[in-house]
Amino acid sequence: MASVIQKSVFRAVELEAIDVRADSTPTGPHMSWRVALAPEAESDIGGRVVYATLHSHGPAGGGQVTVAGLILHHPRTLDLSLDEFRDAINESDALECFYDAARGALRVACSLVDVVPEIPTEAPSPEFALLRKRGSAIDKETPGDDGDSGTTTQVDEAAS
């Protein structure tokens, strides 16, 4: 079904950088683009929650940004399976909007520590994962940078 879905039936909205980090620690050049999707469309909002994380580091340092938002569907696409949805948005402009938001935030964060990482202008193919609701059996606590109780990890890496 995904192959006949037009790119324009998906829209990225409510994008917000929820985690931004940058440092000037030298490492070998590496980059990752990970996208975590809600397992089902929320019928009351007409879309799915998406968390997308861009990580880029190089010889002078780098950083990481996570952008949260929604990808809205056309009503005829609300019943797509997770695999169909993943395939369809991978070709859509909506997912590119998440990348553009993450890329812009990462460039700004890195500029604050005088680092200019190599970040492609077009999104690479993402690694997909599955979001889980807080309180599910697979949640894991991860310590926060400030020593607080941490945040709930909401990504099931096995879903990709």
Image: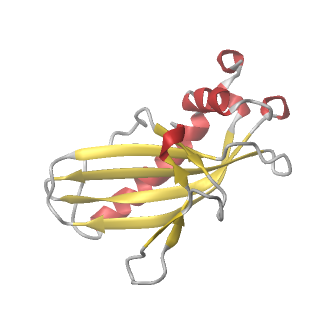
Q: Residue at x 42, y 66 (%)?
A: 20
Q: Which quarter of the figure is the N terminus placed in? A: top right
**Residue that protrudes farthest toward the front in the picture:** 137
The residue sitting at 53% across, 47% down in the picture is 98
Above or below 133: residue 150: below
In the foreground, 140 or 68: 140
What percent of the width, then of the height, locates residue 97? Answer: 55, 44
Q: Position of residue 83 (x, y in %)?
A: 63, 29
Q: Position of residue 147 (x, y in %)?
A: 39, 84
Q: Position of residue 87 (x, y in %)?
A: 59, 26
- The residue at the point 35 percent across, 57 percent down is 107
Q: Is 152 located above or below residue 2 in the figure? A: below
Q: Is residue 158 above or below residue 109?
A: above
Quadrant position of residue 60: bottom left
Q: Residue at x 37, y 77 (%)?
A: 145
Q: Is residue 36 left or right of residue 70?
A: left
Q: How many marks?
A: 0
Toward which corner of the image does residue 86 lie, by quadrant? top right
